[in-house]
Image (cartoon, coloured by chain):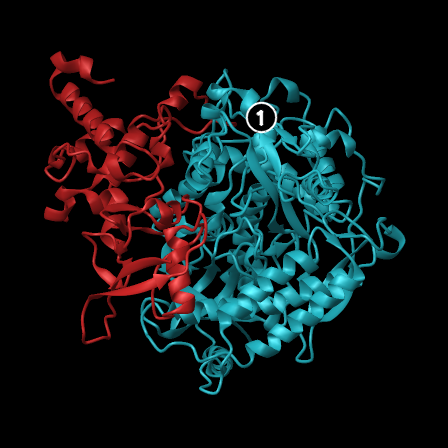
Chain colours: A red, B cyan
């Protein structure tokens, strides 16, 4: 048995938001996602949450679990100190229970042109890219856009216009891609007041990322590239 | 009333690729998806996508013809050969296109797309991005739909296909999950790319959202399903959770080891092939080892990667390492991975041709929910991602062309009738007299399928399975009422999914009971040989109120004559 305390909210319920406690019948190796399913199927079928792959690759189930933003499917119950307290992602409007409106999060992602802007006309076969050039994309391309970083970011809390760690990481993914021809345009785009210089280098995003990525590091690299672009004497920064 | 020239249902690889192509063909397209596109199960694909690019030094004389032959032989000769040749011929161009759109494939030293060996393939032919190929392809296609400003209906779940009196498809009726409303959307063409149906089985690699509802809806609307008895078990699902451990593990040189520390595959296939036998054979071999007492704790075998070394594991299989650390707390660099065969893929699906066309004009399908058939009785690893992109593209083009010359207006009469039909079905889920717990019924189905319609099958077990499923269908008629919340009523969603799972599970089981031979993934202990004179044919199942109606259709045999399948 493990005690769960889950955030509840139904837009049609006059009570407004509240926490509800449940006793979950746990088994060995059970994840928080399985625990939430157990509650929904056995105690309260009105509980709403998102899930899909249950293998930490689809990014559906980022939530706030015992003080940390993480994926419910990737978190084992017996590694947590009871009670297991679960809230939805922060800085995004709650739609129902553990489900938030991801629209602002994806709007920020969409406005950075998150697609390859080809440098050259496509060849008949593939663009050639050396293993070293490809290695520069390692990690950035593993982002699953779950929103854990965004929920944990104190700047995103204060400023919904801030692009956020997920969108900025994606910018570096394209800036670093040898096939992309819009590097300068991309750097100019994020040199704005809602871009990289809004980041306070707090590292919460790195701390919580379920894929062990480092958006803060990516943002710092973007800052350096922008500075190097502006002040040729700082060219050494543009790795 | 809402109307689009083309509606695509499902935003995984097949659906998004179809939508992009239909838009390129001049159609006004909308994509409906019950989960955000990036949550689609395509993203969980790991090992790679096949094309005869001949980029690997060992594959310099590979060709689309050889790829087609491997595919057909892998299918145990049930694949339609013209379709398989179409797929393998299209393969290089669609993969280059994904690369041009930014897909971050791993690279050879000379900068080309890297390729690794995979089961049942004569050459290293599987293009990969580490062990996250599906994730990279999915994000790349999503990025393209952002670029093209594709119209999405996110978290809209289609529940009914609207078919007019002439049998043509005129749109869909869908649940707006956030809002709780049931809405009609008219269309001149509908493309289903709803993916797999793994959740009929408890021991599946598939996502929670991969249910058989996407197959059941067209079936209920009169569109036949094909070859549903052919269920692929992936040899290496993580023990207990059944999370996929890619075939790439073995492609990179991983071993399968039994409780006696032996590489047992030598008992089943040639020394040259070993762990890289096709999935049906490898899964049966593992099941046999466990059955004969050489499993570890009598339940699994080891997938051993330790000899590959840390550097190679980190470079080629980083995702596998993450999954092992997160879900079983072991590091494959230092420990072998406990694995067992897990339900993975439905070779069968909506009966369609290589342009996605079905019996119903205006209704198309592509990807795992479709059965063209290119996979026949057993799919080769790396061919499913290829299938989604090749046939997604082709069905998108065909649907746009079909929709082009039809009047741009919703057929309100047909849509209203479909809406009415759905309301009747849903009213039954709210019957206050019901008492059965739907989740108990689901659990019972998921327990029955692996044991009665599993890797090894017999008439007796299949008969018991069929009776059991029919019993579950009876119990389902008396389920407790669905909860009453409006917004994000997930109880309603899961109950609808279960309705699809039950009906399709019955077809899988009944089809397996009728097919008195062994072919590919369908293995009957009581008919252990392939029987071409009687069974070299597709199973076709059509809905009737009294139960599924079975008939059979010819297999397209071309230049490759059926021969004994040896590896």
Seen as rendered, the residue at the extreme front is A1
Q: Nearer the viewer, residue B522 or B134?
A: B522
Q: Quadrant of the C terminus of chain B?
A: top right
Residue B135, by quadrant, is top left
Give the total of numbered labels: 1
Q: Residue at x 65, y 49 (%)?
A: B232
Q: Is residue B370 visible?
A: yes
In this rendering, the answer to whether B113 lies above or below B245 is: above
User: Badge 1 is on which residue?
Assistant: B252
Q: Is residue B3 visible?
A: no
Q: Secondary structure at mark 1?
A: loop
Circle 1 residues within 10 Å: few <14, some 14–19, many ≥20: some
Q: Residue at x 24, y 52 (%)?
A: A89
**Residue B499, percent from left and from top:** 54, 71
Side of B319 relative to B394 (left or right): left
Q: Residue at x 39, y 66 (%)?
A: A40
Q: Nearer the viewer, residue A200 or B328?
A: B328
């Amino acid at each position: 048995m493990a005690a769960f305390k889950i955030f509840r909210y139904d837009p049609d319920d006059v009570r407004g938001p509240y926490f509800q406690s449940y006793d979950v019948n746990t088994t060995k190796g059970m994840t928080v996602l399985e625990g939430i399913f157990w509650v929904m199927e056995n105690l309260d079928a009105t509980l709403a949450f998102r899930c899909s792959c249950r293998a930490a690759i689809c990014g559906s189930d980022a939530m706030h679990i015992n003080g940390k933003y993480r994926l419910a499917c990737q978190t084992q119950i017996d590694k947590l100190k009871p009670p297991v307290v679960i809230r939805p992602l922060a800085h995004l409007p709650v739609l129902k229970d553990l489900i938030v409106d991801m629209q602002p999060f994806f709007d920020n992602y969409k406005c950075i042109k998150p697609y390859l802007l080809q440098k050259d006309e496509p060849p008949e076969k593939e663009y050639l890219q050396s293993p070293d050039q490809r290695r520069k994309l390692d990690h950035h391309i593993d982002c699953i856009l779950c929103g854990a970083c965004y929920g944990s970011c104190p700047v995103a809390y204060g400023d919904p216009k801030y692009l956020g760690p997920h969108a900025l990481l994606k910018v570096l993914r394209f800036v670093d891609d040898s096939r992309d021809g819009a590097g300068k345009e991309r750097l100019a785009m994020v040199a704005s007041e809602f871009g990289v210089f809004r980041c306070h280098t707090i590292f919460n995003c790195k701390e919580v990322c379920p894929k062990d990525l480092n958006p803060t590091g990516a943002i710092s690299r973007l800052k350096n590239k922008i500075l190097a672009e502006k002040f040729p004497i700082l060219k050494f920064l543009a790795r | 009333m809402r109307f689009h020239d083309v509606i695509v249902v499902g935003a995984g690889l097949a659906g998004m690729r179809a939508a992009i192509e239909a838009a390129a063909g001049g159609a006004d397209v909308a994509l409906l998806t019950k989960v955000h596109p990036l949550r689609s199960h395509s993203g969980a694909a790991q090992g790679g996508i096949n094309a005869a690019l001949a980029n690997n030094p060992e594959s310099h004389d590979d060709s689309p013809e050889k790829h087609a032959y491997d595919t057909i032989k892998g299918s145990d000769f049930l694949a339609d050969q013209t379709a398989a040749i179409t797929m393998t011929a299209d393969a290089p161009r669609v993969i280059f296109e994904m690369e041009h759109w930014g897909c971050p494939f791993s690279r050879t030293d000379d900068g080309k797309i890297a390729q690794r060996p995979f089961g049942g393939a004569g050459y290293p032919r599987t293009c990969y991005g580490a062990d996250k190929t599906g994730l990279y392809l999915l994000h790349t296609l999503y990025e393209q739909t952002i670029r093209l400003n594709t119209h999405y209906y996110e978290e809209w779940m289609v529940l009914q296909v609207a078919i007019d009196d002439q049998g043509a498809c005129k749109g869909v009726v869908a649940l707006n999950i956030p809002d709780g409303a049931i809405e009609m959307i008219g269309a001149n063409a509908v493309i289903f790319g709803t993916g797999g149906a793994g959740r009929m089985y408890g021991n599946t690699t598939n996502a929670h959202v991969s249910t058989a509802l996407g197959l059941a809806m067209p079936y209920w609307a009169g569109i036949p399903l094909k070859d549903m008895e052919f269920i692929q078990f992936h040899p290496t699902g993580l023990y207990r959770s059944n999370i996929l451990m890619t075939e790439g593990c073995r492609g990179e040189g991983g071993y399968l080891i039994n409780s006696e520390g032996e590489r047992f595959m030598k008992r089943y296939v040639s020394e040259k092939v070993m762990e890289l036998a096709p999935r049906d054979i490898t899964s049966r071999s593992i099941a046999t080892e466990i059955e004969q007492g050489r499993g570890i704790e009598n339940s699994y075998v080891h997938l051993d990667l330790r000899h590959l070394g840390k550097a190679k594991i980190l470079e080629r299989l980083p995702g596998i390492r993450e999954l092992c650390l997160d879900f079983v707390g072991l590091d494959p660099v230092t420990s072998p991975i406990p694995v067992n065969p897990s339900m993975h893929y439905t070779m069968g699906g909506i009966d369609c041709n290589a342009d996605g066309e079905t019996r119903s004009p205006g209704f198309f399908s592509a990807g795992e929910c479709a059965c063209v058939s290119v996979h026949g009785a057993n799919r080769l690893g790396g061919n499913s991602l290829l299938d989604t992109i090749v046939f997604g593209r082709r069905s998108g083009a065909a649907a746009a062309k079909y929709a082009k010359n039809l009047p741009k207006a919703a057929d309100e009469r047909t849509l209203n009738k479909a809406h009415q039909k759905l309301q009747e079905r849903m009213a039954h889920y709210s019957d206050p007299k019901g008492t059965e717990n739907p989740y108990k019924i689901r659990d019972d189905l998921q327990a029955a399928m692996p044991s009665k319609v599993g890797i090894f099958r017999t008439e007796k077990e299949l008969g018991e399975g069929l009776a059991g499923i029919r019993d579950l269908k009876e119990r389902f008629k008396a389920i407790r009422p669905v909860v009453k919340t409006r917004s994000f009523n997930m109880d309603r969603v899961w109950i609808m999914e279960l309705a699809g799972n039950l009906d399709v599970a019955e077809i899988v089981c009944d089809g397996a009971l009728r097919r008195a031979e062994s072919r590919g993934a369908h293995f009957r202990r009581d008919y252990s040989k392939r029987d071409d004179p009687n069974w070299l044919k597709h199973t076709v199942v059509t809905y009737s109120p009294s139960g599924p109606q079975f008939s059979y259709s010819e297999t397209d045999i071309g230049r490759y004559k059926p021969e004994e399948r040896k590896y």
